[in-house]
Every structure is written in C-alpha cells, then in structure tokens.
Amino acid sequence: MSETAPPEESPPFGVCLSVFEHWLKLRAESARPDRLPTRDQIDMLTLPRETLPWFFIHQREGDRYLNRLAGTAMVEAIGFETRGRYLDEMMAPALYPERKALLDRCAEQAVCVHYRATLAAADREHVGFSRILFPAASDQESAVDLVCGTMVFFGNAALPPEEKKAVEEGYRGILLNSYFDGTTWRRIES
C-alpha cells in the first residue's frame, strides 16, 4: 500500500492523519501535566489498524535516535530491517542533518511534525514518503525521549506538480514540512 496524491497544503492525510488523531486521543488520556503520552499508552492493539504496518518508535539517546520498532510495510519499502539501528547509520550523510532537525523539533518542542521528502534511492518503486512524528515519553517522569509515528511511501505520479518537477530534476531532500502548534498546522520555512 502507498499513499494516494498528497494534498497541496501541509496537514497530514491518510495513514499519517489516522496516527495524528490517535496521538490527540492519547494526549487527552495522559496523566502527565504536559499531556504527552507515555510508552505504556502506545499499544499496538489500540493503534488504528491501517497504521500498524507503517508505525515506528525511535528512542532518543543523547544526540541520536535508535529505531525500537518498525512496521513490516515500512521495512519492506525501505528495503532492510531498521530495528536496533541508529538513524544516522541508515541515512545518507548529506540527508541526515535536515531529517534529524525535524526529529529534534518534535522531541525538544514536544510538537507533532509532518513532512514529505524524497528517498535517497531513486531506483526503488517509490520516490518519496510522507511521515508524521509525534512526541512521547518512556514514563511519567521522563523528558520526551520517544519520537513515534508513521512513514508511508508514494510514487512520482502522486506528487503535486512543483514537487514532481523538482524530483525529476534530481532534487533530493525535504519537499514540505509543518508542525502542529496545538490548534493548527504551520509550515516550517527552510
């Protein structure tokens, strides 16, 4: 399964929207003063069914992110097992800093982040992905140390015209990114 055409605006859609709405529900049920969900709230039995194959959990360890859980469809689309590996070991060095900055924004500002980006391996069936990141904590007392979400893939035909043109011209990087400020999605200007 891959996503259909992404909308022109920055709010998440499809599987990313489903997991975002689930995160809002987890926040409403959270006992933490900051209303962030904890790891024990993130239950594979209560996640929206359509998100499971695309769901992931990254644990922040110092300045790095360790993949703790990765859905089967996500792993298949990426082409290798990601669990137990650090993100900086799995990404092209040129792409890592801007992608890490989005995870850092999610963890440090405790906000959801949604972005679309190209894949480094252009020879695969998919040219890009849509990803939502949401902050969580290991327990009631921890700082944000988990970044969870979904990552779904799409082909060139699903891109809006300006993004399709950029990809065809060889652009590799972030196509669109936004964060949720508590009431609305706001674009992050590069």
Image: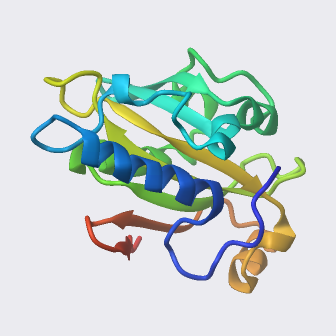
Front one among 169 and 90: 90
Q: Where residue 156 sits in the image (x, y, percent)?
A: 83, 67
69 lies left or right of 66? right
Front one among 173 and 181: 181
Q: Quadrant of residue 37?
A: top left
Residue in the picture at 67% in, 30% down: 71
Can you say whether 68 is above or below 95 in the image?
A: above
Residue in the picture at 55% in, 28% down: 44
Residue in the picture at 52% in, 24% down: 67
Can residue 8 be seen in the rendering of this structure?
A: yes
| Count of numbered labels shown in the rendering | 0
Q: Where residue 180 sits in the image (x, y, percent)?
A: 34, 64
Q: Where residue 28 sits in the image (x, y, percent)?
A: 26, 48
Extreme residue toward the top, this view: 84
Can residue 101 be seen in the rendering of this structure?
A: no
123 lies left or right of 147? right
Q: Quadrant of residue 159?
A: bottom right
Quadrant location of the C terminus in the rendered image: bottom left
Q: Where residue 110 sits in the image (x, y, percent)?
A: 25, 48
38 lies left or right of 123? left
Q: Quadrant of residue 21?
A: bottom left
Residue in the picture at 70% in, 84% down: 162
Front one among 128 and 143: 143
Extreme residue toward the left, this view: 33
Front one among 134 and 125: 134
